[in-house]
Amino acid sequence: MFKSGYLNRVFTDLTKRYHDQPEFLQAVEEFFGSMDSLVDKEPNIEKHSIIERIVEPERIIKFRVTWTNDKGVIQVARAMRVQFNSAIGPYKGGIRFAPNVNESICKFLGFEQTFKNSLTGLPMGGAKGGADFDPTGKTDQEIMTFCQSFMSELCQHIGPNEDVPAGDFGVGAREIGYMFGFYKKMRREWNGVFTSKGIASGGSLGRSEATGYGVCYFAQEMLRAYRNETFKNKRVIISGAGKVGWMAAYKATELGAKVIAMSDFSGVIHDENGIDLELLKNLSAKYPVVMDKYRATHPEASFNPDTKSIWTIKCDIAMPCATQNEIYIDSAKALVENGCWMVVEGANMPTTLDATQYFIDHGVLFAPGKAANAGGVAVSGLEMTQNAMHLNWTFEEVDAKLHEIMAGIFKKADEAAMKYTGTHNLVAGANIAGFLKVYTAMLEQGTL
């Protein structure tokens, strides 16, 4: 599978041990594919068992969450926090509330977070966590009750110099506020233990826009470096109508692109005149899904309830911003056949391994999520800095720092790719650049 016998041995052992964790193994397999260009050139990696150590979380905390709904019925959810690697800083990563949260998904996300955080240049380790709790349809009181029960256990394992959680799927400013308030009460101190907080609670301006904006800033660097072009008049399609997809659509449009298709759970809207973002914003204030309602105002647009149909639309740039594994090989082939020449991942691992390789083999400029969607955690790091300094930066200051960080991530990934592979393969470059900082820190700190 890999050129390196060392990597093959480690991966074989890992697949035997975690055969029931497909998302985690997929993330490791992609990472090992990049390490093939590095491990034989750096004998200390094998000598010090760096790979064996880096694929195992430093700890996994599992616990139950018992809470009572508005009808007085006691509910039980399963929760965990995967503290993956703290070599370069305190653990940092989101909390996810969704029915499919399990150990495989939390480990995959925490593993990816380790290298994503490293790429930002900020001192943050990697972690992820959450619970198999579905906030959909729950009242504010139920969500507050759940968050407080969740925090009654997790508050023992986090802190501004230990582990700093943030939001993720199902966890926004409301949920972070409830958890932060309970943590503050239990620990009797105010500190920057959470990011993605509301502004009044010490959050950072620009945090809600950061991931989507960062995706576009990264794409902007690719366009400049590889094609000497800008977003102007580029036809863009974006999956996912959550915070990342929305903000990416706004920023891409602001930079001169035409966003011609977007999707949510209800399906795909395709409007060759360019998506009416203000209409979607107004609809989203009233309905949980909105794409199926767009044509009432724009009958010239087309709607398809099949969310995968978005990948069959002719475009220049595709931005998958929904969830992991949304672009399979058939969708990759359809994108290439219909003229797509750049794919920028806004979600975590939204492209399967064979689809990623297909893009690379067919000359598609490809930006992996661990580099392109690092804007969210980058501004979370800036929020930690503001909290520690007891000050707030303006939106313009935060946005300028975000732009600088994303340009820096692109430069690191591209330079590492050229140095170790002789190509502009940003998948390899991002993995290698992210790994090297963690690896160096691990060597410096010994084997404990």
Image: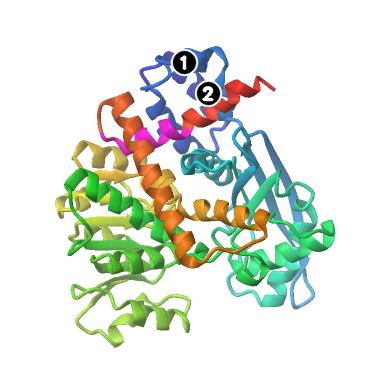
Q: Which residue is mark 1?
A: 6
Tell me where residue 311 appears, x and y as whole percent: 26, 58
In which quarter of the view is residue 265 placed? bottom left
Three-letter code, disc 1: Tyr
> Label for residue 51?
2
- Secondary element under disc 1, as helix, strand or loop, is helix
Task: Please tell me the numbered disc located at residue 337.
Answer: none
Q: Is residue 355 visible?
A: yes
**Sequence-first tag of 1 and 2:** 1
196 and 359: which is toward the camera: 196
Please indicate whether residue 164 sits to the left or right of residue 274 in the image: right
Q: Which of the 4 quarters of the picture holds residue 59?
A: top right
Range of the magenta residues? Answer: 424-434
Where's the C terminus, which quadrant?
top right
Q: Quadrant of residue 125?
A: top right
Residue 399: image location, x then y, percent: 44, 61
Residue 426 painted magenta: yes
Is residue 22 shown above or below 255? Answer: above
Q: Position of residue 375 (x, y in %)?
A: 45, 53
Residue type at mark 2 is Ile
Q: Nearer the viewer, residue 353 or 53?
A: 53
Q: Position of residue 171 (x, y in %)?
A: 59, 63
The residue shown at (71%, 73%) is 142
Separation of residues labelled 1 and 2 (CA atoms): 9 Å
Identified at 58% across, 70% down, the residue is 136
Q: Is residue 386 left or right of residue 33?
A: right
